[in-house]
């Protein structure tokens, strides 16, 4: 869908991610919905690869999400199939059968069990997905697996995304280089939990599946679960991590291993960068906003207030209008239902104090504030003055572009 | 602010409400923000008038809301002052002083105690409101009080509203005519609780304050608290009811009095019509949508699911695009966090079944559905198939008009 102009917040260039030992992939044009672009990704993992995942909490999750939820406890992965253009969600019994057949085709192509195949679909909800489309396609993909370039899988999973999303980290553990590569897609229907809506991370780190799972869940909190484009949560949100164990170091078998934290930090960096890419490709976005809340009674309370601000249509339209409308910020604090004292509130845009002690700050500088609001990357900080709780939620503005993408169409 | 075109959903005419004995009013141009229009309303009640109210649950409520909250337990009212153009919210200690001074000026003009004065302000948040502006204005208003026409107070309290909102009921109790008149304003920053944002209802019914309070709160649930324009909750939302007791019948002193239910139903009709007017004047609205949820595990669960659908930007933009996008409805059901079984869901637009048993309905008629979606008044029904819980939430679509009103400005 190159129909929409590329986000003005798109990165100027894309990282040239290195191969990750034990991971190969191929993409294909299956014509599921789009023409003249890839829409299927097959990723193959060497034997011994472990898997972890965080899935949507939607009560109406898609058939592919249900499939992953069933396979995750096994902890082993040999293949991943992703298609864009059709989410295979809300397709009833047909959806379940389509997922099972797709897994069977992929398992046959890769020579593994269906329990080791993970699936994700993104696109239109409610249209049955014909698994027959994957038959020849996946067989063909399996014959031409490569380990680079990573921009290809990032492109194949796009829907309304206007740019591919990649991030990688290389760290040295015990003198050995360990790699983490990640891709993501997502632009609308983005809110915790999860906000991805799809992201796949691979590493050659030898690590136990349960340790990987714990680290993945922990660092999702401050990355994919700390972003919102439009407060709408997808039925298909899926974040999967695969560790091939090919790096020549001792495996991390426990969270007590000091290398778990080092690896976790690098994983966190990758997840965070991918999540920010999603916000910066938010439908119609022209500005990225980091909403910081501090001085709340707890971190959870701070998060809920930050989310309330970041989800507020009135705050987001004001930011689109380059207006430091802190009155709307107060409104969004007030509606969060969390402890807040109107007369202790302080609000800053960037370093500029606009409100303090429940009223406009004495030295409020309208010209400086207006100049700040013209920027592309904005920081909004609310200090509650009640406690030590803090959290940050990342969002974008709400513009005519969002309405155009989501309202001016006939599907 | 006649800057915005009148809502296409505006009523074709306005009711010519009759006088309510014991209630008089005057409006004035105080120039608080707007030019060439009335922006102040003084309403005067005869001695013996009782008051009831439902106020915003925002943690950052305005100074005027705090004032009403303090006076409501007294249960008596002699005056109401409403201004538009400045909400006097988030104005710190200055806001509190401004409210006290305004009440003093009104009490002096009407010859009553400040404890019998109720106040409401609507408009910009964060600008101090100079109570001095009210001094001559309220004195003057007090000299020219009238009992009609009711469109004047309805006009004086408008902000981004594109039409005045009035509703009335006349009922006969014990052979005597009893009147209920109501006005409201609200267009954006509209969501439970409360969604008004301002509404005032008067009646000549003799009724105890606590009975009036109970009836008001009960019928707010299915009127003002069942509407949403943009999920944003105002810091100033105020619904006040005043009963002068002038009708020549015995007073209703208890909820056990069978007349309480008869009166309550009429009150409910007035509140409901006013609330619907607010939705139909939703910023940028081109369609009104009634979102019905049935078959939920409880009424509360049904309400939360209906609210999730009615608040969803993706559902609202699809409706603006005249697309029966039930996939987005499924998404909104799923994100509500309430019990739902994807494979039992049924979704109807009007009488047209579009989805059933978790997939597209077999007889789905795209042409008929498209024709239905072109209407101005839409009914969306979600059947969960789990229990007997049901609820309805009323909303409007999300269009470029909303972005224009809220984003294309410099305040």
Image (cartoon, coloured by chain):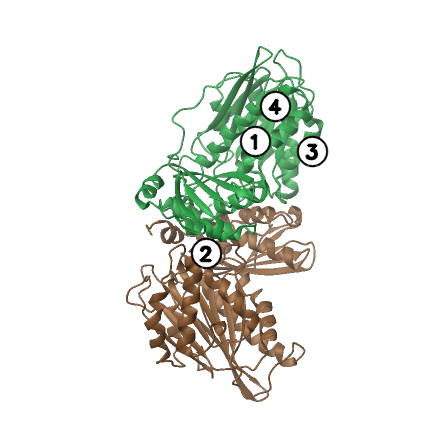
Chain colours: A green, B brown
Label 3 vs label 1, nearer the camera = 3
Residue that badge 2 annotates? B189
State whether residue A74 is above or below residue B248. above
- Chain of residue at mark 4: A
Q: Is residue B359 visible?
A: yes
Q: CA distance from mark 2 to mark 1?
A: 47 Å
> Please, what secondary structure does the residue beneath circle 2 have?
loop
Label 4 vs label 1, nearer the camera = 4
Q: Are marks 4 and 3 on the same chain?
A: yes
- Occupied quadrant, residue B148: bottom left
Q: CA distance from mark 2 to mark 3?
A: 42 Å
Query: Where residue B73 sits: x, y (%)?
Result: 57, 70
Label 2 vs label 3, nearer the camera = 2
> Please, what secondary structure does the residue beneath circle 3 have?
helix
| Mark nearer the N terminus (3 vs 1) | 3
- Chain of residue at mark 1: A
In depth, the one of B100 and A172 nearer the eye is B100
Query: Where residue B285 sits: x, y (%)?
Result: 42, 58
Q: Is residue A295 left or right of residue A15?
A: right
| Mark nearer the N terminus (4 vs 3) | 3
Label 4 vs label 3, nearer the camera = 4
> Please, what secondary structure does the residue beneath circle 4 have?
helix
Q: Are marks 4 and 1 on the same chain?
A: yes
Residue that badge 4 annotates? A261
| The disc label shown at residue A133, or none | 1
Q: Are marks 2 and 1 on the same chain?
A: no
- Occupied quadrant, residue A205: top right
- Chain of residue at mark 3: A
Label 2 vs label 1, nearer the camera = 2
Q: CA distance from mark 2 to mark 4?
A: 44 Å
| The disc label shown at residue A70, or none | 3
Q: Please report the residue visible at 60 percent of the width from the left and 68 percent of the height from the top.
A: B218
């Amino acid at each position: 869908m190159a129909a929409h102009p590329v986000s003005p917040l798109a990165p100027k260039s894309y990282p040239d991610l290195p191969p990750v030992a034990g991971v190969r992939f191929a993409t294909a044009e299956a014509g599921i919905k789009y023409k003249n672009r890839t829409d299927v990704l097959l990723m193959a993992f060497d034997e011994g690869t472990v898997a972890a995942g965080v899935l949507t909490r939607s009560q109406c999750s898609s058939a592919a999400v249900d499939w992953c939820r069933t396979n995750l406890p096994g902890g082993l992965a040999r293949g991943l199939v992703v298609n864009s253009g059709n989410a295979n969600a809300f397709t009833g019994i047909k959806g379940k059968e389509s997922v099972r057949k797709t897994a069977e085709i992929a398992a046959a192509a890769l020579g593994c069990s269906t329990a080791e195949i993970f699936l994700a679909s993104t696109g239109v909800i409610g249209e049955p997905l014909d698994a027959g489309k994957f038959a020849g396609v996946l067989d063909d993909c399996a014959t031409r697996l490569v380990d680079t370039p990573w921009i290809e899988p990032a492109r194949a999973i796009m829907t309304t995304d206007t740019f591919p999303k990649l991030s990688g980290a290389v760290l040295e553990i015990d003198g050995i280089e360990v790699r983490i590569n990640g891709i993501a897609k997502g632009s609308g229907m983005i809110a915790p939990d999860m906000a991805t809506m799809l992201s796949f991370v691979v590493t050659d780190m030898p690590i136990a599946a349960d340790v990987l799972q714990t680290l993945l869940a922990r660092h999702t909190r401050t990355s994919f679960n700390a972003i919102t484009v439009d407060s709408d949560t997808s039925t298909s949100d899926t974040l999967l991590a695969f560790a091939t164990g090919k790096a020549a170091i001792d495996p991390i078998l426990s969270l007590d291993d000091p290398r778990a934290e080092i690896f976790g930090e690098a994983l966190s960096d990758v997840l965070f960068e991918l999540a920010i890419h999603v916000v910066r490709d938010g439908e119609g976005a022209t500005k990225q906003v980091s909403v910081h809340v501090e001085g709340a009674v707890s971190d959870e309370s701070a998060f809920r207030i930050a989310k309330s601000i970041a989800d507020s249509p009135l705050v987001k339209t004001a930011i689109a209008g380059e207006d430091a409308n802190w009155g709307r910020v107060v409104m969004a604090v007030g509606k969060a239902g969390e402890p807040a004292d109107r007369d202790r509130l302080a609000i800053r845009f960037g370093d500029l104090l606009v409100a303090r002690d429940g009223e406009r700050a004495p030295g409020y500088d309208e010209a400086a504030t207006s100049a700040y609001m013209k920027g592309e990357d904005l920081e909004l900080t609310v200090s509650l003055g009640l406690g030590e709780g803090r959290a940050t939620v990342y969002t974008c503005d709400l513009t005519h572009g969002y309405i155009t993408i989501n309202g001016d169409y006939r599907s």
